[in-house]
């Protein structure tokens, strides 16, 4: 097989983008912090950015910790290549999400619209960071584009 054919076989086929609690309220919730882009608009942008990066994707948002754990586990059995995750408030509280990421060992990029390291003290702790390959914080909605690009590059090199 030619090298290009091998690269195509090994290239990531699908990533999963997970958004945690209250991110369905983008554009409504604290627009001074999170911006004016609505959740619906973000979902469209994510589809475009994945298409530009040459990778398929699924999108999932939930306000429920167990649903997020279930979706991470399902991703393992579906053969998802990587995860971009904004765990939102569960960043700072969820050992269950950390354990699901560790159990599946799916390469994950943690993303936050704001720079959580400069906010309240409790937001500076991230359980997800213990399993993530990379973190992007404080780049607004564009951080998702960066996360997709970083993850696709990482998967292509792996």
Image: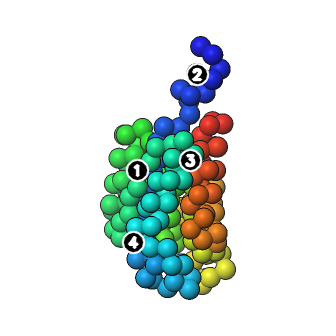
Give neighbour class at mark 1: few <14, some 14-19, many 20+ (Cα, 10 Å): some
Q: Is residue 96 visible?
A: no
Give the image quarter of residue 112: bottom right
Q: Which percent across, then down, holds residue 6?
A: 59, 22
Residue pointed to by mark 4:
24
Q: Pick the residue in front: 73 or 84.
A: 84
Q: Pick the residue in front: 15 or 43.
A: 43
- Between the C-alphas of marks 2 and 3, the distance is 20 Å
Q: Quadrant of the N terminus?
A: top right
Label 4 element class:
helix
Label 3 element class:
helix
Q: Is residue 75 left or right of residue 135?
A: left
Q: Which percent across, then down, holds residue 12?
A: 53, 38
Q: Pick the residue in front: 73 or 10.
A: 10
Q: Is residue 1 visible?
A: yes
Residue pointed to by mark 2:
5
Q: Earlier in the sequence, mark 4 or mark 3?
A: 4
Residue pointed to by mark 1:
58
- Between the C-alphas of marks 4 and 1, the distance is 16 Å
Q: Does 117 sit above or below residue 86?
A: below
Q: Residue at x 39, y 72 (%)?
A: 24
Q: Earlier in the sequence, mark 2 or mark 4?
A: 2
Give neighbour class at mark 2: few <14, some 14-19, many 20+ (Cα, 10 Å): few
Label 1 element class:
strand
Q: Earlier in the sequence, mark 2 or mark 3?
A: 2
- Between the C-alphas of marks 1 and 3, the distance is 15 Å
Q: Which percent across, then down, holds residue 152?
A: 59, 44
């Amino acid at each position: 097989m030619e090298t290009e054919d091998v690269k195509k076989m090994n290239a990531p086929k699908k990533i999963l983008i997970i958004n945690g609690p209250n991110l369905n309220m983008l554009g409504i919730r604290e627009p001074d912090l999170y911006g004016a882009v609505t959740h619906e608009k973000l979902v469209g942008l994510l589809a475009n950015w994945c298409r530009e990066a040459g990778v398929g994707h699924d999108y999932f948002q939930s306000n429920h910790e167990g649903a997020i754990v279930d979706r991470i586990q399902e991703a393992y059995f579906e053969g998802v290549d990587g995860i971009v995750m904004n765990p939102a408030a569960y960043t700072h509280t969820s050992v269950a999400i950390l354990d699901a990421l560790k159990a599946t060992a799916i390469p994950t990029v943690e993303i936050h619209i704001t720079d959580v390291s400069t906010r309240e003290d409790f937001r500076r702790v991230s359980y997800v960071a213990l399993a993530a390959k990379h973190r992007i914080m404080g780049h607004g909605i564009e951080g998702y584009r960066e996360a997709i690009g970083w993850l696709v590059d990482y998967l292509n090199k792996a």
